[in-house]
Amino acid sequence: MKGTVYLIGAGPGDPGLLTLRGKEILEKADVVVYDRLVSPAILGFCNPKAKMVDVGKMPTHHKVKQSEINRLLVQFACEFPGGVIARLKGGDPFVFGRGGEEALELVAAGVEFEVVPGITSAIAVPAYAGIPVSHRGIATSFHIITGHEKADGRTCHPELYETKNFSSQVELCPLGRSEAESKDPGQNLSLDFETLAKCPGTLIFLMGIANMDFIARRLMECGKDPKTPLAFIEKGTTPYQRTVMATLETAGETIARENVTAPAITIMGGVVELGQTLAWKKNLPLAGKRFVVTRAAKQASGITARLTALGAEVIETPMIETRDVIPATSSVIPATSSVIPATSSVIPAKAGISSADFNALANFDILAFTSTNGVESFFRQLFSAGYDVRVLAGKKIASVGKITEKKLLEYGIRCDYVPEDHTGEGLGRLLRDVVDKEERVILSGERSSESKDLIESRILLLQGNLADDTLLKLLPQATRWVVYETLPVAELPEWKREAVVGADAVVFASTSAVENFCSVILSYTTLGASPLSGSYALWVGERSSESKDLNRESLTTPASCSPRLAFCIGRMTESAARKHGFETVTSDETTMDSLVKKIVEHYKKES
């Protein structure tokens, strides 16, 4: 048996353009062989246990030769019998992606494969720049031409125009050698320029920036109007997309003056002028921004969707993970229960602090939740212990803030107490007031005698192992159950470290995320394993040339690199970020909507 290889088109860059089929395969892949143009946000969809193999190619050198990639795909199919091997390629595998060559190699080796088409950059990138490749009255056909030739320079595989209303299929050879293979770019092109010059439709050149000056001159020599509008679109559909306008006669000088670099496509024809009116992506408030979101994986999707919809690229980089704490042995846990993971741990009992004991729930009148993790762990363990929400009948429920309150509503539980100040201290003061009010009721004789300490002792705090003692100091007679523990993420995969380098800002929702983010990244810096070229500041967007030349040995603390920008939820998170030298922007409320609003406001002021 051999594994199955999936040739997956990742699209041009925007993770939203990955197909559902492609995402489904990546989530279960055993091996992912990916190119350099694959968005890091798309790599974030991959099975976290998958073997990640970077075979990325640069325009002027091949990191891994195509023949070696072909061999690797067969090798992995043999090493993983019955496994899923994902070959992840930018754009579409069969649109100048050499997917056909890989497929032929798999057929020769007897390896099963499937092709998962992707959205080609030839159409998507112009669309993101507001340029339709066809438009009634302007262009009734479009033609896609490659600017890349096989490394040996000998074999000319025919490529066909992709057309509408084009009666004949014109057979073309690729445009020529790469810049690394020829000191005179364009001279070796095997292309029918006379036919191209007469094409009335839109011409789209992929991977041809190095040859474009020569291509433009030859097209003009063959009769194409020198005033033909032309656009170079760099890094299309990513936050760093840039469109540079020119004409056929100014193509070469524009590339040099504007420093147009790969990856870029060239689109030529009357439709280019529509881009001045129809460009939509650049108008999104967060267009051109990349954010690192440090929330736990299961919680990150909410803010990721919000930021992405506003034009940003999001790199989900969870810095913490949580797991349930095994309840006390007195709980009635059915022998058949499998809800609580085998990796759950036991928290040693301390004064006022223990793991959950659901048989003791009757002893409490108020249940206070301080995080969404606490809500989920509590109910997961409650249900696993054979109980349901009826055991909460008559009890008052308190939440530290609106996000936790919303999570409780998912379990059908409405909160009785939510402080205006969405912090542990705010919740503690609110419950302190509740206790004082109960005491006044007792003193007035409206209820039977009951001590203040006894009232307070009937408050149950449901927290994680890293929660500080703020609530217990304000409510010393309360009981705290540790229902989950927070574990730091020990390291980041190489592709993610590289992705975070160019980020504009980092998003923190907890002090533990701040501390671990700084700890992990500092370890890469001090150990010399960081891809930052010595610049710790690059992790949050410092991109100047000076930052790349910083001496790594001088970077002993995160605070030594400034400025750095962090968007924070809550004052405690803000305080932790500032301690590590971050410039901070904090949401007015402890909600994701409030934080996203603050992010948008920040960049509006900046612009």
Image (tube, grey):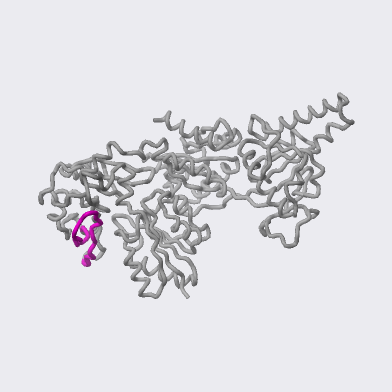
Residue that sits furthest to the top in the current view? 444
Direction from residue 141 to residue 560 in the image, left or right: right
Q: Position of residue 284 (x, y in %)?
A: 39, 37
* Residue numbers of the magenta segment: 154-175
The answer to whether one can see residue 43 in this image is: yes
* Res 509 quadrant in image: top right
Residue under the image location 39 percent in, 39 percent down: 287
Residue under the image location 29 percent in, 36 percent down: 277
Q: Nearer the viewer, residue 41 or 447?
A: 447
Residue 540 is inside the magenta segment = no
Helix, strand or loop for the magenta stretch, by majority: loop
Residue under the image location 82 percent in, 43 percent down: 363
The answer to whether one can see residue 255 in this image is: no
Residue under the image location 41 percent in, 68 percent down: 113
Q: Nearer the viewer, residue 500 or 227?
A: 227
Q: Nearer the viewer, residue 538 or 164?
A: 164
Q: Position of residue 35 (x, y in %)?
A: 38, 57
